[in-house]
Image (cartoon, grey):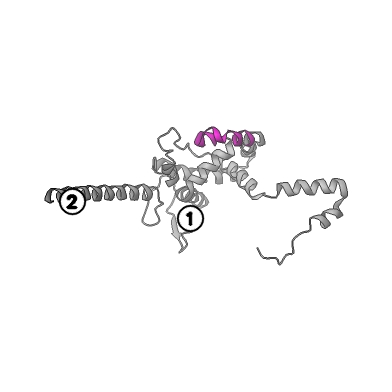
Amino acid sequence: MRTLARVLLILLAIILVLGLAGLGIGYATVRRPWPQVSGTLTVPGLRAPVTVVRDRWGVPHIYASNLHDLLFAQGYVHAQDRFWQMEFWRRLGSGRLSELLGPSALPTDRFVRTVGWHRVAALEWAQADPETRAAIEAYAEGVNAYISTHKGRLGLEFTLLGLMGRNVEPEPWEPVHTITWGKVMAWDLGGNMSAELVRAGIIARLGTGAVADLMPAPPPDRPV
């Protein structure tokens, strides 16, 4: 009986140790990519001190003495808070999503490359005026400052999906990626594309008056 009790105690101790170790590893995995929301950081690339204050909802408010640093800090904070979304949409907008998700994403990549979001973004970047280029470049510098100092801990999603260390380390953020990101967001917000095609077909066949009868606009005071 004593031997059995001793064995059970040893097994219980082993289970307890393994459980505590698992909790520690899990806590470190979850906590490691979290953004720093307090304290002081030294970030190369800033021209003057910048203050980032988060309100009770966690929304950052950035205070800087010049536009470059303001946009630099915005890029850094965006990367801190949402780099998985930034990386996902960057690859989506460039037709490179299959590099993350495998062959299942190839149809999406083909469609996106046919539409040409990244191609149009590159043309817009080439034609941007100096002021616009300086602003977008400052933002990209901030994103890259975060990427370069957080190798291997860029977001919980990367860890959970097992992407870190699989030759998918994020590339430097380029100005054209910001414009491409805007194209993806515009497409995402343009969810009425099918309805617009229907409206165009009605106008072509029945005239503009028929649109108001068949697809009336919702009243302005309707609930959201």
The image shows residue 78 at horizontal and vertical percentages of 49, 50
Residue that extends furthest to the left in the rendered view of this protein: 2
Say whether residue 83 is magenta: no
Residue at 85% across, 45% down: 204
How packed is label 1: few (under 14 Cα within 10 Å), some, or many (20 or more)?
Answer: few
Residue that extends furthest to the bottom in the rendered view of this protein: 221
Residue at 59% across, 39% down: 93
Say which amino acid is labelled 1: Ser
Instruction: Find disc 2 in the rendering and name its residue.
Output: 9
How packed is label 2: few (under 14 Cα within 10 Å), some, or many (20 or more)?
Answer: few
The image shows residue 206 at horizontal and vertical percentages of 87, 49
Sequence-earlier tag: 1 or 2: 2
Snapshot quadrant of residue 166 = top left
The image shows residue 135 at horizontal and vertical percentages of 55, 46
Say which amino acid is labelled 2: Leu
Q: Is residue 48 left or right of residue 205?
A: left
The image shows residue 43 at horizontal and vertical percentages of 40, 47
Instruction: Find disc 1 in the rendering and name its residue.
Output: 65
Secondary structure under badge 1?
loop
Residue at 50% across, 51% down: 74
Separation of marks 1 and 2 at Cα, in angstroms: 63 Å
Residue 108 showing in the rendered view: yes
Secondary structure under badge 2?
helix
Residue that extends furthest to the front in the rendered view of this protein: 1
The secondary structure that most of the magenta stretch takes on is helix
User: What segment is highlighted magenta in the picture?
Assistant: 96-111
Residue at 62% across, 37% down: 112
Q: Is residue 115 left or right of residue 97?
A: right
